[in-house]
Image: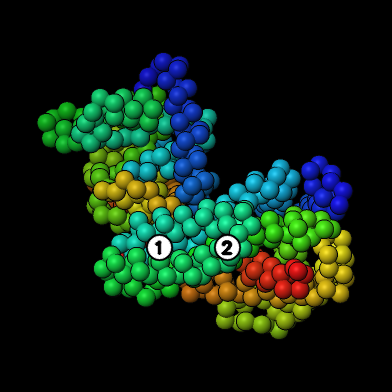
Amino acid sequence: MSRNPFIRLLRFLFFAVVVRALILVALGLTVRNRERLPKDGPAVLAANHNSNLDALALMSLMPLRLLPKLRPVAAVDYFFTSKAKGWFVTNIIGIIPVKRGSGKEGGNPLLACEEALDRGEILVLFPEGSRGHPETLGPLKKGIGHLACARPKVSIIPIYMHGLGKALPKGSTVLVPFNCTVHVGEPLYGTGTYNDFVTALGEAMMKLGAQEKPPAWE
Amino acid sequence: MTIVFGLPQPVVTATAGVWAVLVVASLIVWGLRLRGPAERYEELVRRTESWWWMIGAFTFAIAVNTTVAIVFLASISYLALKEYLSLIPTRRIDRGLLLFAYLAIPIQYYWAATDWYGMFIVFVPVWLFLFFPALMASRGDTQGFLRAVGTLSWGLMLTVFALSHLAMLLVSGEVNNPVAGGVGLLFFVVVLTQFNDVAQYTWGKLIGRHKVTPKVSPKKTWEGLIGGVLTTVAVAACLGPYLTPMDWQWSALAGGVIGVAGFLGDITISAVKRDLGVKDTGGLIPGHGGILDRVDSLTYAAPAFFHFFRYFFTP
């Protein structure tokens, strides 16, 4: 993320005006158990992934005061397809780029995430890895487990969202307004093995998702 | 009619009255919370806080000018339609088509803003009623067709057509209400409908015993309904001659129409919620639920009062 004060101001205005108008006014978020959201970093918001709007919606949940600390984690290959797109997601959205599958080559793909947590930042992360089937929770990747166990003191907040997959699903560029419901869960900590953590997180997210029966979407 | 702050003087005085009632009610709630266990009144406090926002927004909207008021009313339709479409089962194939449903709102409110009654009254019930099923049929997916057509048409009627009567009342009332203009009529129906909700709720809480609709809305009682409507009739009889060309008898009758229509709107949305298995239509207004929970009674009271007034008091 840029240190340039002008770009930081641009980022602030983008989130304070454009994103909030879009997410909170045009779409509308209903947040269940808002009090469980972290008051400050370091923390990880781990949510299900249905739409390109997911990260923006999660970032709108947090007060603007924390915006400089908010960092969505995103895949390099998807977002760095052009120079302009790369600049935008790096400087305005403020993502931490992760190289998918680079763990197999022996490196630590989540090093940047760990460093961000050490700086007290708040990560927005989608453990499913990609958007998958709209409005369903796919299997979780192991990365979140490694990250949680590497920083066991950091609270990981499971979150389940309904509705954004209808508003802007994968493969669509037309936004249709739908309300979105966000269920915030109790924080989890990576105290055991990474596999246990991934299982626990998956169960917590499933449980949050089951709190509400979304209307049929067939 | 005397104009104060750009509004007819009776509307300014009546608005001041609403704010006075709000202040007194807030003081009572505040007192209750100080005396009793705070958790018991948490919901009531949230509700009261939300009333400040809603009455504030309404006052602002009518105080600036007619355009702002119409945009405000159109936004209520937008939020209500969005909430409705988010609650009901929908078909993936209709996703893009629902964007056109939203487009109906600016168009419908444009007819109202330009006082084009002929278009206003046929646009949704005739043109959109014919257009959307044909559009859906032309896309070729017949699975769930009838349900998709039915739910969309009904939703548009309720959230766009019915609620837009408020804007039509505001615009057309300008010439038909020499006492306090269109804004006087708008104020009359909106404030009385909301007052009627609170009155029915309060009477029900105080002396409610016999359930009206045990299956649909178990908290509604005959005592609440009758007490609420009678209170609304009494308030309408006092307010009407001051804000509208109706004398106190006609105003009382209008109050009865608003009270009963408001109740019917309320139980209709309750039936929808029960059918869908949700408690609230949304979480937009803390302590109240969604916007549909708040305007449910208006979806019936607005057209009912509009056509009552139009039939008896428009030359």
| Circle 2 chain | B
Answer with the quarter of the image where residue A58 lies.
top left
Residue B43 location (% of width, % of height): 66, 57
Left/right of residue B259 with respect to residue B276 in the rendered view? right
Residue at the spot 72% in from the left edge and 81% down from the top edge: B222
Q: How many marks?
A: 2
Residue at the spot 55% in from the left edge and 63% down from the top edge: B119
Residue at the spot 26% in from the left edge and 33% down from the top edge: A79
Tell me the residue that label 1 is attached to.
Answer: A214
- Secondary structure state at the residue bearing disc 1: loop
Left/right of residue A211 with respect to residue B283 in the rendered view? left
Figure quadrant of the C terminus of chain A:
bottom left
Using the image, determine if residue A4 lies above or below residue B259: above
| Circle 1 chain | A
Mark 2 and mark 1 in contact (Cβ < 8 Å)? no
The circle drawn on residue B285 is none
